[in-house]
Each structure stands twice: as C-alpha cells, then as structure tokens.
Amino acid sequence: MPALTFENISKKFGDNTVIDAFSAEIHDGEFLVLLGPSGCGKSTLLRMIAGLSDITSGDLLFDGSVANDWEPKQRGVAFVFQTYALYPHMTVRENIAFPLIMDAFRKWYHLPIVNIVARHRLMKRADIAERTLSIARQLELEPLLDRRPASLSGGQRQRVALARALVRNPALYLLDEPLSNLDAKLRTQMRSEISALHHKVGKTFVYVTHDQVEAMTMATRIIVMNKGIVQQVDTPDEIYDRPANTFVARFVGSPP
Ligand code: ADP
Ligand code: MG
C-alpha cells in the first residue's frame, strides 16, 4: 500500500487554480522529490499533506485512508522549512526537545485530545533528555547543545531543524527546499547528510526543490510538476533518459 495517495487533487485560491487534478502515489520508505519551477505549487502540495492547507477537491489518502479532514497533529508528519524557524531564546538542546516537551505537556493539560496521546509515545523527563542526546549525536550536534541559534552557522541551524523534526520519530518527513539558504559547498554536504539520514531512519521522505541536481542526486523517484500539473513520475534515470515532454526535457537538462 502506498504511504500517500493523491487522487485528482485540486487547489484553488479564489479563481486561481494552483494544483490541477493532481494524481500520484508516494511509496512507503522512498525518497520522493517534488521537482518544479518556482510558483508551480510544490509548497502548496506539501502544506496539504501536512494538513496546513485545505484541499479544494479530490482526496488525499494516508496508508489508504482518506485524510482530507485530519488535523495536522493526527498525521504523524515532521515538516522542515526553508527557513529554519528555530526558537531564538532556547538552546539547541531545548529546540530539539521542544516537540517532546509539548507532547508531554498536552498529556497533562489537554487530555481530551486523545489522538495526540494515542499517536505519540509520551515520555518522561529522563527519556526526553536521552532521546534529545541520541538525536543530537546522530546529527553531530552534541558539542552545540548549550548554544543558542544566533551563534550557529546556517548549516548548523538547518541540522538543528532536522534534529527537531527527527526527535518524535515521525512516519513521514516533509522537507520544503531545506537547503536553499545555504551556500553551494554546504548544500552539497547537507545533501549527503539528508540522504544518509533517510537510509538510517528508513521512513518516507517528501522533498521539495526547484533544483534539478538536488533532485537527481537524492531521489528514489521524482514527481516533475509545472503549473500545478504532474508532468512525469519516474526514477531520476528514466526522467533524464526518457523525459515525458519538452518541459521535462528542458527542466532537467536532458540531451536533445
Ligand atoms: P512553489 O512552492 O512551487 O514555489 P507555491 O505552492 O508556493 O509554489 O505557490 C503556487 C501558487 O499558489 C503561486 O502562484 C502562489 O502565488 C499561489 N499561492 C500560494 N499560497 C497562496 C495563498 N495563501 N493565497 C493565494 N495564493 C497563493
Ligand atoms: Mg515553495
């Protein structure tokens, strides 16, 4: 069963159709890249997966169940944005632990939200500290745990954002152009780190980018889109060697 299924999904902002009859499947455990030019609807699609944006028509399925109306919290997704959105007043340790602390807090103060309690393994203080440390080690952040975001480099900050996404052990990772604010050298390095992370955690990743090279080097499969419409869904090799149309050929730079 696919992890995610898009069935004829459309999204309108007023009269403006930004996603148009979008159908595709994302497989369990794959590294799926959503590739397309700026403004083609990639972020909108990712926000719909996360439950942060309504679907105008069509169905979005999680593991075969229609999830159009599920609350964001019910979906078990982690979202990493282009801007790192760290809490400036908190240390790295606190930033990473924050989702777990929030879960524990909800357990005591919002008991009626049973979904959250059912969804996340709730943790005690010591477990939170241990989990935070283990994630920090995985991403080589242990020496920085007591620093604040302002004193970190761009790459270090993005790594903290990744650690924070990882800490809850989500089933699905959504990454929206997470490397676009980094310089070229760091971007290359972080590409390998994110790929390694995918191998390590073995979960489904949906990675948005407008960068062909990023898509080609990281993806198990790519969905190429343009103007809210799926152009091709295939492996990087197939897309490069056998582009479905002239848009895809030009965009990925296939030889004529
Ligand atoms: P991408 O991430 O591929 O650059 P987006 O999903 O951000 O593209 O945007 C797709 C289109 O939807 C753009 O034309 C954008 O202006 C429009 N759009 C995105 N969010 C909104 C919004 N909240 N209200 C109106 N239009 C929006
Ligand atoms: Mg975007």
Image: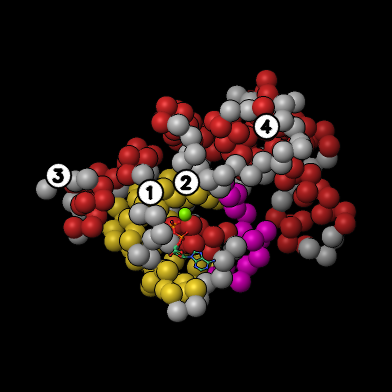
In the figure, is residue 119 to the left or right of 110? left
Tag of residue 255: 3
Is label 1 within 8 A of ligand 1 (CB to nearest ligand atom)? yes
Mark 2 or mark 4, which has the lower sequence index?
Answer: 4
| Residue type of the residue flagged with mark 2 | Glu
Mark 1 or mark 4, which has the lower sequence index?
Answer: 4
Specify the segment rendered in magenta: 66-80
In front: 247, or 220?
Answer: 247
* Position above or below: 122 against 21: above
* Position above or below: 125 against 253: above
Report crowding for label 2: few under 14, some 14 to 19, many 20 or more residues within 10 A (C-alpha): many
| Residue type of the residue flagged with mark 1 | His
Mark 2 or mark 4, whichever is nearer to me: 4
Single out the residue that lies furthest toward the front. 150
In the figure, is residue 109 to the left or right of 62? right
User: Disc 1 designates what residue?
Assistant: 210
User: Disc 4 designates what residue?
Assistant: 150
Is label 2 within 8 A of ligand 2 (CB to nearest ligand atom)? yes
Report crowding for label 3: few under 14, some 14 to 19, many 20 or more residues within 10 A (C-alpha): few
Residue at 38% x, 71% y is: 20
Count the marks: how many? 4
In the figure, is residue 19 to the left or right of 126? left
User: Disc 2 designates what residue?
Assistant: 177
Single out the residue that lies furthest toward the bottom. 15
For marks 2 and 4, give the CA distance. 21 Å
- Judged from the image, the secondary structure of the residue bearing numbered disc 3 is loop
- Judged from the image, the secondary structure of the residue bearing numbered disc 2 is loop
